[in-house]
Image: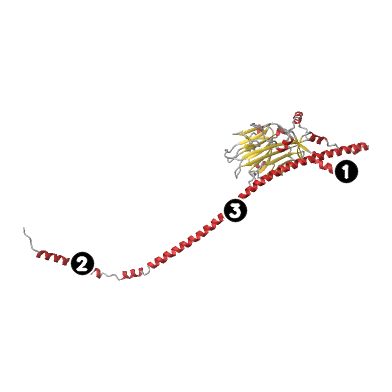
Amino acid sequence: MRISSASLAWSWSLLAGAAHAQFLVSELSFGYTNRIAPEHSRSIPHFELQGNPYQPEILSNKVVLTPAAPAPGGQRGAVWAEHTLDYSRWLADVDFRVSGPERGGGNLNIWLVKDGPTNVGTSSVYTVGKFEGLVLVLDASGVRGGGSLRGYLNDGTKEYKALTGIDSLAFAHCDYPFRNLGRPAQVKIQQTDRLFSVELDGHLCFSSEDVVIPTGYRFGVTAASADTPDSAEIFKLVVMHDNNDYTFKSDEHQRQQQQHEFHDEHDQYTKQKPVAGGEGHPPVRISRGGMVEDTPEARNYERDNVPDADANTITSSKAQFADLHNRLQSVNHHLSTIFRQVATSDQVGEKRHEEVSVQLGQLKGLLTKLDRLDMIEDKLEQMERDMKTLHSELRQSVANAESSVRQHVAGRLEGHHDRLAETLRHPGYGRLIFVIVAGQLLLAGAYVFYKRRKASSPKKYL
């Protein structure tokens, strides 16, 4: 059987990405299984909770560092890893959600510092004293007030709470509207041999070749709420390391990683993605092809990598055939693994498709409410037209009534003023005098008649 060098080169380039894997550090991670903490537990394994005045609340799938209204403002919460990060190449993934009123307040801080629970506690970058390490701050500032992420470094000499203009001390920043998204937001921090980078929801925020975080620091997340509080929730903190980075891994940790047991494969895929180090879950490998269980087949996948050999060392046809056979067998194993990963990805894709279909159905139900809004808008427009018609009719009625009153008054008073003026112009005093004199004479005659009749009447004597 003959295989061209071009075909072999293509096969090896296809498998180069799959050969690069990362492993999860369970003692620095939470939120990668169905539950953040064991049921009825008030603590997270390998993590320490701090709060002022109240401790953070642990729910099944999240940690509430600061609650929203009606809870009072001015609260602080923190979650700190009990173990240090002892790897030089690593990747940290933080899923969080911040929600609250339209105008937000407070901040969320992601720390990787020395002795974080003691030196930082529940502080934010604006209230912390001296610290040594890195902090990424998410607050409601930014160009449009929608939010931003800023990165700060300190060697333990600067006391930040005593400084002014802390925003200007950031070595990098980017605008990021993280509040009220309706979904968890993601911050991904990665340290490689040559680059330090920060991504937000899959988009690069900033990167630098001059930043190298030393080992021995602790991960932590703190949140502080303002007078009008925001709800700060942490869904996941996952830390992974390069599988080639064995420099800082102790023998005890290796033994612990080898002692993780298997559970039913069906449960691993019907529930949340399996990850290494969780209680009751097998360890997994995280590669470019996706998340894969650390099963014997997966370990064989690593062992099947045939090391490169110098062509000058293969001198016989038998050795050449054996080398070609081994490499073809390795290619076959890798392709089988890729096919299994693709099948797993298809299952995950189908599940996500079903979830999206359900959400689309719910969205269609909400769209029917928009039709009702159109009906209400039409009714309001009809009411507006009716009001305008009623207003015009009322004005016309008032005008008609005013015209009728004017016509009526004008008909009644027509000529009245002229007659009154004519009468006043020629007053008659003679008639008045005649009436007075005649009345006096009539009274005088009646008196005389009375006297005469009385005098002529017979007198009566007793």
Q: Is residue 378 visible?
A: yes
Q: Nearer the viewer, residue 196 or 441?
A: 441
Give the residue furthest to the left.
462
Mark 3–mark 2 distance (CA, rounded to whole Å): 93 Å
Q: Amino acid at mark 3?
A: Asp
Q: Amino acid at mark 1?
A: Ser
Task: Give percent across and percent down for residue 245.
Answer: 78, 35
- Residue placed under numbered mark 2 in the picture: 439
Element under disc 2: helix
- Residue placed under numbered mark 3 in the picture: 374
Whether 390 is drawn above or below 302: the answer is below
- Residue placed under numbered mark 1 in the picture: 5
Task: Give percent across and percent down for residue 142.
Answer: 65, 45
Element under disc 3: helix
Task: Give percent across and percent down for residue 268.
Answer: 72, 36
Side of 324 where 187 appears, left or right:
left
Q: Is residue 87 visible?
A: no
Q: Nearer the viewer, residue 116 or 162?
A: 116
Q: Quadrant of the N terminus?
A: top right
Q: Amino acid at mark 2?
A: Gly
Side of 339 where 33 appears, left or right:
left
In the picture, residue 200 is in which quadrant?
top right
